[in-house]
Image (cartoon, rainbow, N blue to C red):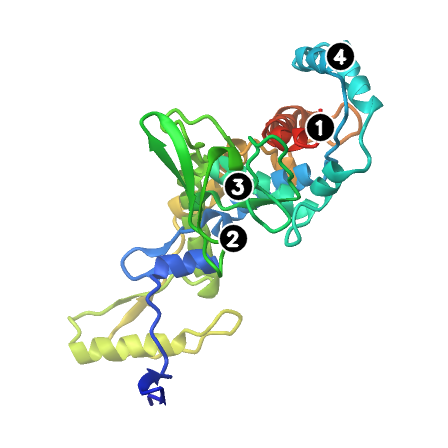
Amino acid sequence: MKLAITIAGREFSLGATKSVTSPDIAAFLTGTDVDDQQQGTKLVNPYAQSAWIFTAVSILASSIAQIPFRISRVGSDQAKRIRALRGSADPRHRAICRRALGNDIIDSGPAVDLFNHPHPTMDRQLFWEMVVTWNALRGEFFILPLDGDDQPVDLSDRKPRVQRMLTLDTSLFWHMVQGYTLEVWRYTGSPLLTPLPSEILMPSELIHSRTPNPYLYWRGLSPLIVAGVPAQTDFAGEQFQKGLWVNNADTGVIVTTEQQATTEQRAAILAALRERKRKAGTADRPLFLWGGAKVDKPTLSMMDMQFLETRKFLRQEIFSIFRVPESFAGFTADLNDGGAGGSLDSVKISFIESTIGALCSTIEAAVAPIVLTFGD
């Protein structure tokens, strides 16, 4: 039934409208599977569909978000000394840096308030988690400094006043290069998906940090490009296992007959098989066949069993790409947690020094222009 209403001589339809959104886009927005009759379920959104990618990225994001972000006030001469000693492996040099940075930590003020409450729609925990999540998924992240009215702040101004910060979807940024110079960034916003409308932003109005990308200088290299193959393989194995258990651990049946069955007989056999099969957790009904038909139930082959066992190695590969130890996800069967000096403690220390330390240095370098707007 179609309903319509006339306003000022114009007729407006009130009937249901058909969505023009493609299945792939709709699946990406909702994080669901795409069931194609030819290809089966596809991996469209690895972060929402792969358990191992979600776990690895979540561990990175939550670990960084739990580290306090502190700002120290140091003189220019002392700052040069700290930068020179910071990359040293000597424990004495590290102690000097920690002592110098810990002497004059700023506990209050506009800079501290900004990083404690970056935006009315985003608290400190969510802000850092989004920064690390975009960096892990896309190989880059954008931070947009804003004033009190949510307008972009040009950090190249003489006295910029940053009162808010937002981290935005990296896939919505398009770099506009003229000649060999990055002129502007084009941001494509949407009212239902993003907190800001579409804008043209100058490079000095954005904080852009990226991982090395030998193929495209202006953008970072997404780790998902490398993790795509193991994630798709693991997703296929997961869907195979899901279908097996949803089907009451039944791999299907093969019906053989002495003579070729007619179309009506095949339809009757298929109807009987469908009537027999029930949902998971419910016993299947008895099946009666005639005309010498026999039912053979195939079992899982060694290749199928090995296919399922391979998921363990795929998990290890995905975690190694994101540089996250499996023990942080609860897989500690092969580790010895026997106290100080144990292998589990060594893994934790290595994770902090290599992965977390590198991420903290990246974030520190990225937000330094915002911190410097509040003074030396």
Query: Which residue lies at the image location 59% right of the left edge and 30% below the top edge?
Result: 366
Specify the farthest residue to the front: 158
C-beta proximity under 8 Å, tags 1 and 3: no
For residue 166, above or below residue 8: above
- Going from N to C along the chain, the mark reached first, 3 or 2, is 3
Q: Position of residue 152 (x, y in %)?
A: 55, 43
Provide the residue designation for mark 1.
Answer: 375
- For badge 2, the amino acid type reads Leu
Q: Amino acid at mark 3?
A: Trp
> Which label sits in the foreground, 1 or 3?
1
Judge the density around disc 1: few (<14), some (14-19), many (≥20) Cα neighbours within 10 Å.
few
Query: What residue do we see at 65% from left, 36% from top?
Result: 327
- Depth check, front residue: 90 or 187: 187
Disc 1/disc 4 C-alpha distance (Å): 30 Å
Amino acid of disc 1: Gly
Camera-near label (2 vs 4) is 2
Question: How far apart are the two marked residues, 1 and 3, measured between alpha carbons?
Answer: 29 Å
Residue behind mark 4:
91
Mark 3 falls on what kind of element?
helix
**Which of the two marks, 1 or 4, is nearer to us in this view?**
1
Q: What quarter of the picture does the C terminus occupy?
A: top right
The residue that label 3 is drawn on is 134
Residue 337 in the image: x percent, y percent?
Answer: 74, 32
Residue 157 as seen in the image, left or right of residue 34: right
Labels 1 and 3: the sequence-earlier one:
3
